[in-house]
Amino acid sequence: MFSFLGKLFGTDKAGEKLVDGATSAIDKIWYTEEEKAEDAAQAKREAAAVYMKWLESTSGSRLARRMIAFMVTFPWALANFVAMILRASAPFFPESAEVINASASSLTSDASENNTLVGVVLLFYFGGPAAVDASKGLVQKWVNK
């Protein structure tokens, strides 16, 4: 067969290349579930390798990242938590319920103003290098308030 194709296209190698090319093209037409799964697994392995390399390269700044994450998220979480406690306790103090609810609303409002900042910090801290691009929009949103 290759000799016939070779005579038709000039050489036996040309015939082999034609058959190999046609076989390869036909194989690429069908993207099987197994191939999809293999590609997805490979992508996950590559992403994990990038993330691990990033963690290794920034190991000296881990403490600083933790401190920044703590400094930003602790006041936000505390405000939300105290507001929740105040709202839950207001019915037990009917004479002060209005003041307690106002305090809870104030705390919730203050915490809500920093939702984007907290999101950016947590995304950067836990997301690694992939999150840097994702967080650009959030940073702009928080800065342009």
Image: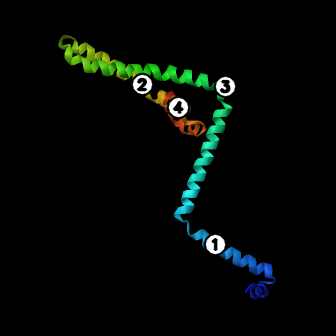
Q: Quadrant of residue 93?
A: top left
Between the residue at mark 2 and the residue at mark 4, the CA separation in whole angstroms equals 13 Å
Badge 2 or badge 4: first in the primary sequence: 2
Which is more toward the observer, 97 or 48?
48
Between the residue at mark 3 and the residue at mark 2, the CA separation in whole angstroms equals 31 Å
Residue linked to disc 1: 25
Where residue 135 appears, as percent x and y from the top left, is 54, 35
Q: Is residue 74 left or right of residue 9?
A: left
Between the residue at mark 3 and the residue at mark 4, the CA separation in whole angstroms equals 24 Å
Which is more toward the observer, 83 or 98?
83
Task: Classify 10 Å Cα crowding around label 3: few (below 14), some (14-19), many (20 and above).
Answer: few
- The residue shown at (77%, 86%) is 3
Which is more toward the observer, 52 or 86?
52
Mark 3 touches mark 1? (CB < 8 Å): no
- Label of residue 139 in the image: 4
Q: Which amino acid does label 2 sit on?
A: Glu
Disc 4 element: helix
Q: Nearer the viewer, mark 3 or mark 1?
A: 3
Q: Which amino acid does label 4 sit on?
A: Val
Task: Classify 10 Å Cα crowding around label 2: few (below 14), some (14-19), many (20 and above).
Answer: few
Where residue 18 appears, as percent x and y from the top left, is 72, 78
- Label of residue 107 in the image: none
Mark 3 touches mark 4? (CB < 8 Å): no
Where residue 6 appears, as percent x and y from the top left, is 78, 84
Q: Which amino acid does label 1 sit on?
A: Ala
Taking the view exactly as shown, the residue that stands out farthest to the left is 94
Badge 3 or badge 2: first in the primary sequence: 3
Disc 3 element: helix
Residue linked to disc 3: 60
Q: Which amino acid does label 3 sit on?
A: Gly
Between the residue at mark 1 and the residue at mark 4, the CA separation in whole angstroms equals 46 Å
